[in-house]
């Protein structure tokens, strides 16, 4: 049986292999073909048992002596001692199609490498930003707690009058900052991986909206 004329280009190895009848493949591999019994001596271990090697029209085969088995591509690779692309190319020639490997060219491999490196750099940048933000919000809470203590001491030491009113105004302003830092700290530690990535990549305004949720971010001091 002679192979058909080349008519199209294929890139799917499985589709190519299914185009090749087993009788044609076995003949091309110099394996004795018995279409009625579908049994022959194993071409892999050169056994003398003429019924050890069994094959089917769907391309599956098995040797009951050496235990080898597989599909058309596996058989070509085993007998011809070749690579996967070489085996598919051999089958493509038998099938009468042109084989175009899906493997990347050298330029494609280089581009894929650059993309992987860039993705790795971005991943580390996001990680570093998340670590920075966690430290920033934690330190913000500590700073506001220290300020609360100082302002409380000032309020205790002052009497009534303008000076005490000014201290009360400072406490009112600090309450807003303190509330924001606590909300930010709770948000970033409760967020899942996807939310953390979105948060790290967001602008300061977007971060405030995420932290405060449905609250009016404009009413809070602009800190980040």
Image (cartoon, rainbow, N blue to C red):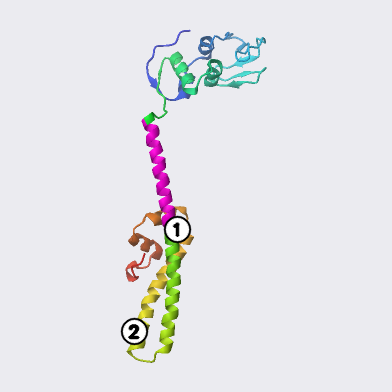
Question: Percent x, y for residue 96?
Answer: 42, 14
Quarter of the image where one finds residue 168: bottom left
Q: In the image shown, does 183 or 138 lie closer to the viewer?
A: 138
> Between disc 2 and disc 1, whose residue precedes?
1
Instruction: Assess disc 2: are there few (<14), some (14-19) or many (≥20) residues with their C-alpha within 10 Å of its C-alpha.
Output: few
Query: Which portion, as a residue range, is magenta?
Result: 107-130
**Percent from the top left, x then y, of residue 110?**
38, 34
- Quarter of the image where one finds residue 214: bottom left
Considering depth in this image, is 155 or 191 the residue closer to the camera? Answer: 155
- Look at the image and say whether residue 115 sits in the magenta stretch: yes
Q: Which mark is residue 131?
A: 1
The quarter of the rendered structure image containing the C terminus is: bottom left
Question: What is the magenta segment's predominant secondary structure?
Answer: helix
Q: Where is residue 18 in the image (x, y as percent from the top left)?
A: 49, 20
Left or right: where 159 falls relative to 81: left
When the figure is inspected, residue 109 is found, relative to residue 215, above or below; the finding is above
CA–CA distance in space, label 2 to label 1: 36 Å
- Residue drawn at x 44%, y 70% as measured from the top left: 141
**Of residues 143 and 221, the one drawn nearer to the viewer in this rendering:** 143
Q: What element carries label 1?
A: helix
Q: Secondary structure beneath disc 2?
A: helix
Q: Is residue 122 above or below residue 5?
A: below
Return the residue at label 2.
166
């Amino acid at each position: 049986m002679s192979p058909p004329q080349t008519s199209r280009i294929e890139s799917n190895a499985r589709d190519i292999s299914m185009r090749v009848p087993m009788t044609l493949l076995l003949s091309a591999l110099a394996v004795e073909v018995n279409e009625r019994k579908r049994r022959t001596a194993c071409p892999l271990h050169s056994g003398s048992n003429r019924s050890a090697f069994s094959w089917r029209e769907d391309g599956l085969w098995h040797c009951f002596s050496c235990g080898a088995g597989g599909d058309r591509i596996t058989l070509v690779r085993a007998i011809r001692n070749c690579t996967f692309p070489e085996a598919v190319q051999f089958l493509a020639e038998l099938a009468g199609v042109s084989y175009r490997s899906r493997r990347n060219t050298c330029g494609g491999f280089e581009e894929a490498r650059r993309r992987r490196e860039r993705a790795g750099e971005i991943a580390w940048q996001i990680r570093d930003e998340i670590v920075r933000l966690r430290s920033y919000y934690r330190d913000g809470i500590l700073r506001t707690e220290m300020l609360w203590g100082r302002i409380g001491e000032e309020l205790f030491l002052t009497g009534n009058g303008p000076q005490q009113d000014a201290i009360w105004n400072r406490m009112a302003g600090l309450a807003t900052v303190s509330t924001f830092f606590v909300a930010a700290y709770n948000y970033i530690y409760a967020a899942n991986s996807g939310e953390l990535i979105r948060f790290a990549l967001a602008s300061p305004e977007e971060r405030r909206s995420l932290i405060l949720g449905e609250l009016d971010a404009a009413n809070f001091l602009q800190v980040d």
